[in-house]
Amino acid sequence: GGGGMCDNDVLPLTIKADKELPNDGKFTIHDFVVPSLLSGSHKEWDRKARQLVDVVDEVIARGEHLSDMHALKHLTKTIPDEMIIKRDVLRKVAYSSLDTVDCSITQGKVAVHFSHRRVKDAFNMGFMPHLETHKQAPGERPPYGKKFLQNWADQCSES
């Protein structure tokens, strides 16, 4: 029980897997209302799972597509004091030019959400490097994520 959960396109910047749970294990949403990086104790995960199931009918009644994000968003509006809501996941690929990371926007961020849309946007703006990959496209995110993390470590990391 308990711990962290992240989407497979969330890449660590400063977060460490061996650290104690943040916020003394209180359920924490690290990406505002997007469930891309979550953490909490066993009791907190159990409580939050039950709450998410309980709001299914309300989410559907409001005409929203049923998803973990819409259910979690509903909970952040109805019971915000029962969780910690942070904005410490970067939602864009932080290049300011080709292979140059904008370190200022990564400050205070524990991870970067390397979503399809953000990678495509960065690639189309000419900020993502051309890599020799199987698909030769930004849809093949792992090599681009690896390159970004290397660039970030070389240019921004203090460790």
Image (tube, rainbow, N blue to C red):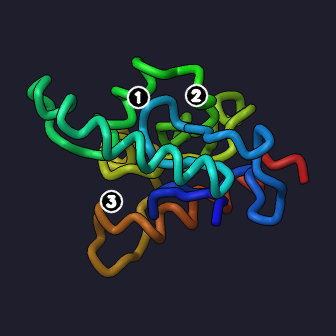
Query: With respect to residue 145, does 78 lie above or below?
Result: above
Q: Which residue is mark 3?
A: 138
Q: Which residue is mark 2?
A: 82
Q: What amino acid is labelled 2 in the image?
A: Glu
Q: Quadrant of the N terminus?
A: bottom right
Q: Quadrant of the C terminus?
A: bottom right
Q: Which residue is mark 1?
A: 75
Provide residue 98's location: percent of width, then percent of height.
52, 46
Of the image marks 3 and 1, the number of the one nearer the N terminus: 1
Of the image marks 1 and 2, the number of the one nearer the N terminus: 1
Q: Does residue 85 appear to the left or right of 58 in the view shown?
A: right
Which residue sits at x=44%, y=31%?
33
Query: Circle 1 sits in a helix, a strand or a loop, which is it?
Result: helix
Query: Circle 2 sits in a helix, a strand or a loop, which is it?
Result: helix
Question: Tags 1 and 2 in contact by the CB under 8 Å rule?
Answer: yes
Which residue sits at x=32%, y=81%?
134
